[in-house]
Amino acid sequence: MEEQELKNIWKNSSRTEDININASQLLKDFKFGMESRERIVRRRDRREIIGAIIGILGFGYSFYAYPNLISRIGTGIGLVALAYIVFKLRNNRKSKLVRELFLPIEEQLSYQKQFMVNQYKLLDTVVFWVSAPLFIANTLLVWGISKSDQSRPILEELTTKWESKLLTTLVFVLLFGYIGLMNKKAARVNWQPLINQIDTILNNLKEEEK
């Protein structure tokens, strides 16, 4: 065997060993980060679903408490939006994606990546499917309340004057805008690094197979 061939074999074997070590460490780090994120997702989903159910009860009360058309349109939008939030959170659970426990590592990682991409999109688009519809619902509810609703004890003191309605609307803008921005930041900070990490692992595994 030629000396150059021996050098190439040694060089390639060292490279393969480095790839194996790197892939193993990346998998270990990724697994730790993924388990942490999954616990956060489960706690978040429980908290958000409970909050949505409470919100549904609140809008349900408002639907009958404030019978004028504008408020009822707002409460109707709120009920639909909150029901959709519950559906969307449950529909993005990992169990919907991972059904096989004994898949090749590449396929398991691909499923994990799809779950993470779904979670990234979920948070990144909160402004469209949470903030916007709930802002519209609450704003219509408040602007629809009139002096004829004075027999109803909730919200009237704050929302019967147009100045109070305007101030409340500005508060809603800040509140739901903040929710949207914080979720976009969470998508970027919590999920994008893991997506990048899993891409690196998959690339290393492909290099190892060569």
Image: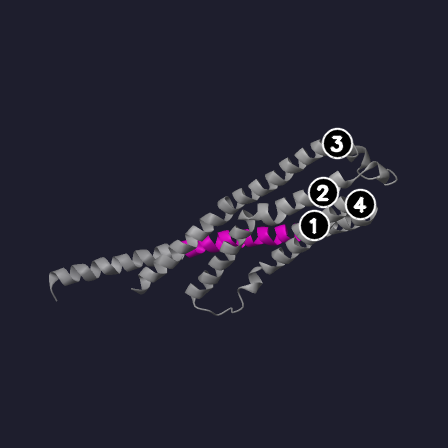
- What are the residue bounds of the magenta stretch? 26-47
Which of the two discs, 4 and 2, labels the residue nearer the N terminus? 4
Could you give the CA–CA distance between mark 2 and mark 1, rounded to whole angstroms?
A: 9 Å
Element type at mark 4: loop
The amino acid type, in three-letter code, at marker 2 is Leu
Q: Which mark is residue 151?
A: none
In-front residue for pair 182/14: 182
User: Residue at point 54% right, 68% down?
Assistant: 99
Could you give the CA–CA distance between mark 4 and mark 3, rounded to whole angstroms?
A: 17 Å
Note whether 108 is above or below 161 in the view shown. below
Residue 43 magenta-highlighted: yes
Element type at mark 1: helix
Q: Which mark is residue 162?
A: 3
Q: Nearer the viewer, mark 4 or mark 1?
A: 4
User: Residue at point 43% right, 68% down?
Assistant: 104
Which of the two discs, 4 and 1, labels the residue nearer the N terminus? 4
